[in-house]
Image (cartoon, rainbow, N blue to C red):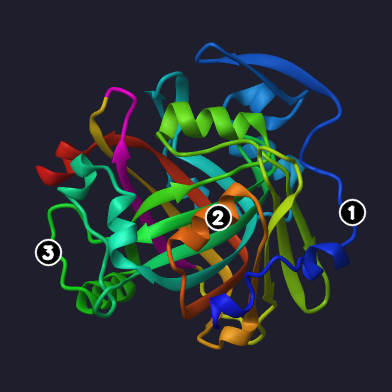
Amino acid sequence: MNMHSIVGSAFWLAASLPVLAQSVVPTDTTEINIAGYPVPVQAGGLYDRFRSNPPLSVIAQESPDTDLSWFQTLKKNKVEMGFASYSPNFYYQNERITAVFTADLERLKAQIPAEVLAQVQPIQIWPGRGLVVLTAYAYHYCDNDAYNEIALSIVTNKPGSSNWGPFTLIGQSMSDDYWGYVLKLPVNTELARVRGVVGYNLPKWLTSIDYHQDDTSVTYTISDQHTGQPDLVFQADKLTDLSQDGALVKNSFTNMNQRGELTYGYAVSRQMQYASTTDDQAVRLTLGNGSLSAFIRSLDIGAMLKYEYVPDFQGALYAPEPLESLLGK
C-alpha cells in the first residue's frame, strides 16, 4: 500500500460511516479513586465490584459461553503498581486488527529515550527502514470493563539480545515472542487511561474511538484529542479461512517508569480465531488533520508487510517489572 496516495485531506471514509455513540462509556457511573485520580467507572461493573480480581465463577455466571479453561491455569497476584491491583489483568472476550508497516529508521530511533535505546533498538528490515505496528483493539469484556484502544509501536529486539535485523524478526515470529516500544496508545475510557499511565507507564490519553463492523470489514475511527473531530480511520477486511488452534502469543514492551527506571511488561494472548495476509488491499488507513495522523506522517510510513485479523482472542496483561530483573535472568 502506497501511504502517500491515501493520506490526503479527503476524509471520505469517515464521512461515510454512521455516527456511533461511545457504547463503552457507561451511563450509570460511580466515582472511585485510583492513585489520587477521581475515575468514573460503570456502576456495578466488574471493576467497581472486584478491582481487577473477579472470581472466575462470577465470569462463568455472567458470560456462560466464555471459555475460561485458559484463565483457570493462570494465577493472579496482588501487586503495587502506583495503586493496589492484581496481575495479570484478564481480558475474556476481545478482537483486534493489526497492520505492520515500514518506517524511517532514524525517525524511529529519535522517538525512543536514550536510556531505553541503550537496551533496545528498532529492527532494521532493510537499509534505512524499520517497522511499526498499528493495532486496534475492542475489549468487549474484561476485568476493567469494556473499552477500545489503538496501539502504535516500534518493533525492537529483546533487551540483552543482539539485533540482527530480519533474522531477529524471524526469530521472534517463530517463537511468537515479540518485543516493541510503545509510541502512542489512545483509549476511550478514563479507567483504561489512568490504569495505563500510572500502572504500566504507557503513553495513554482519552479520546473517542468508535468501533464499527459489517459483513466484510472492521472499522475504527479515532478522534483528535484536542478538537474532538475524526482524525484517523483504520479499516480492514474480515479474512476468511480462520485458524482456531488457540495459539499463545507474547508481546513485550520496554519503557521507563515515573521514577526514570527502566521497566518491561508483557501480555499473553490466546488467539481463538485468527488469519493473516500480505495483501495490502486488505487494509485501508486514512489519515486526517489531527495530532495522531500528523505523528504517523512524521515517521514516513511506507509499505504494509503484514495484516492480522483476530476476531476472537483472550488476554492476560502482566504488571511491569524492573528491566534489571529480566537482564539478570
Sequence-first tag of 3 and 1: 1
Determine which residue is flagged by label 2.
Answer: 294
Seen in the picture, residue 172 relative to 229 is either above or below; the reply is: below
Judging from the image, what secondary structure is the residue with disc 2 in?
Answer: helix
Judging from the image, what secondary structure is the residue with disc 1 in?
Answer: loop
Determine which residue is flagged by label 1.
Answer: 19
Determine which residue is flagged by label 3.
Answer: 162
Q: Position of residue 253 (x, y in %)?
A: 34, 49
Of discs 2 and 3, which sits in the foreground?
2
Q: Position of residue 10 (x, y in %)?
A: 75, 68
Q: What residue sits 39% from the left and 24% below the top? A: 81
- Asked whether disc 3 touches disc 1, contact meaning CB atoms under 8 Å apart, the reply is no
Of discs 2 and 1, which sits in the foreground?
2
Q: What residue sits 38% from the left and 57% below the top? A: 251
Prevailing secondary structure class for the magenta stretch in the rendered image: strand
The Cα atoms of the two marked residues, 3 and 1, are separated by 48 Å
Using the image as rendered, state which of residue 220 and residue 16 is in the foreground.
Answer: 16
Seen in the picture, residue 47 relative to 136 is either above or below; the reply is: above
Q: Is residue 1 left or right of residue 240?
A: left
Q: Is residue 157 left or right of residue 314?
A: left
Highlighted magenta segment, given as a residue range: 247-259
